[in-house]
Amino acid sequence: MGNRPLLERVALRYFQHLGAEGVRRDDRVHILDEGERAQMWRIERGAIIRSGIAGALSSVVSGLAEVYSDAHFPVVEGSGLLGRTSYWGVVLGATVVASIFEIAFLYWDALRSVHRLAAAAGLPLEVVEGEGIPTALARAALELPNPPGEVLGVDPGREVSKTRLAMIALLYKGKIAVSSFVVKMLLRRVLARAVARATIGLWLPFVPVLVTAVWNAVVTWLVVREARVRALGPSMVGESLGELWGDVVPGSRAAAVMVRAVASTIVRKQTLHPNLHALLVAVHGMARVPDAEELDDPARFLSELRALPAELHPAALRLLCVALVIDGKTSARDKKLMDDAGKAAGIDLPIQELEALRRAFISGDGFTPDLLRSLARPAAAPGASPAQSASG
């Protein structure tokens, strides 16, 4: 664990401390029964509510500090340096202390909730060296990014604009402060200054209470949803890969196209999600094509897919669809890749089928053989019966 980020090391040690007591071990982690769904929903709901309360309490402390400073150290025209320093010292000091406690609680509660989610799904978080499910779940709880760098010759950042990533990171860091400031300014603009002073002036310092509570709840919902996806993914990969592989011969050109399907998905998503990492490693191991060039070039994937025999197109497209949803979300870039692949293979891939596959995964229904076979079904040849078409 020595080379891991500090927060990640702390998280993994906490998972070790919690242990696997009470975990019902289940090889089919990705299939959830009604009891497991209900238990996971209770855990998720509790985490969301607690995060909202924590954000609200933190903002109340900051609001009270601002009200106190307005009364005892009012900043008016002509206020000297001492007056301004006293005012902002109280406000910023209280805000920083409250924020430290809030963030510490959110991290601790997120880790505890993620561990409970894994237990509810029957997934023991046994910490070992190297990348694994506990590491992936720890990163989800702490909102740490997926590790950069190439894996098996696949570069997630092949098509990424570094400037765009930097801007997104900057906006993310200031999300709560910016949103609170905007709400305050809107109130001051919309309401007449006199009315604001007479009726809600004292309440303006507490506007961030609602903003922060709602934002915390939204962020925590995203965290627990991501934790659910990461907990279910590896089990789903292990069970469905055999069905997806079909008649593809290891070491063949078709096998290389299967690897390219996953690699191109990683490039289009611009990040190596743990579930995609697991899928890439599994497919690469089955394909046995170590010398394939430019595995992560989407254009080459489409070109080689187009050149495959028609009977092998469905397998590649089905694997592509699974790769596109295995991280729990689909973007416009993902849908564009799916559309381009469908055109290259001459097979229609309705977006409704992709969304149905994604929902089945997230809900814990699994990728049933019938569901997988319904994807990328070749069009019926002229004069063919419906049964003959469905058999493809």
Image (cartoon, rainbow, N blue to C red):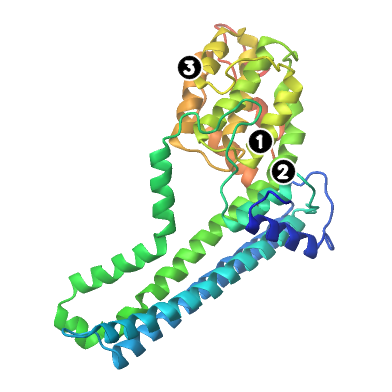
367 w.r.t. 4: above or below: above
- Give yes or no for contact between labels 2 and 3 (Cβ–Cβ under 8 Å): no
Residue in the picture at 51% in, 71% down? 52
> Label 1 is placed on what type of residue?
His
**Foreground label between 2 and 1:** 2
Q: Position of residue 32 (x, y in %)?
A: 73, 50
- Give yes or no for contact between labels 3 and 1 (Cβ–Cβ under 8 Å): no
- C-alpha span from label 2 to label 3: 36 Å
Residue 11 sits in which quadrant?
bottom right
**Foreground label between 3 and 1:** 1
- Give yes or no for contact between labels 2 and 1 (Cβ–Cβ under 8 Å): yes
Count of all numbered marks drawn on residues in the image: 3
> Label 3 is placed on what type of residue?
Lys
Q: Position of residue 75 (x, y in %)?
A: 24, 84
User: Front-most of 281 and 379?
Assistant: 281
Residue carrying label 3: 343
Q: Is residue 375 visible?
A: no
In the structure shown, which secondary structural element does the residue marked by tag 3 occupy? helix
User: Front-most of 130 and 189?
Assistant: 130
Residue in the picture at 52% in, 12% down? 303
> Label 2 is placed on what type of residue?
Glu
Of the image marks 2 and 3, the number of the one nearer the N terminus: 2
Q: Decide if residue 141 is on the left or right side of residue 117.
A: left
In the structure shown, which secondary structural element does the residue marked by tag 2 occupy? loop
User: Front-most of 88 and 153?
Assistant: 88
Residue in the picture at 18% in, 75% down? 191
- Any mark on residue 277, and which? 1
Residue carrying label 2: 131
Q: Residue furthest bottom?
A: 72
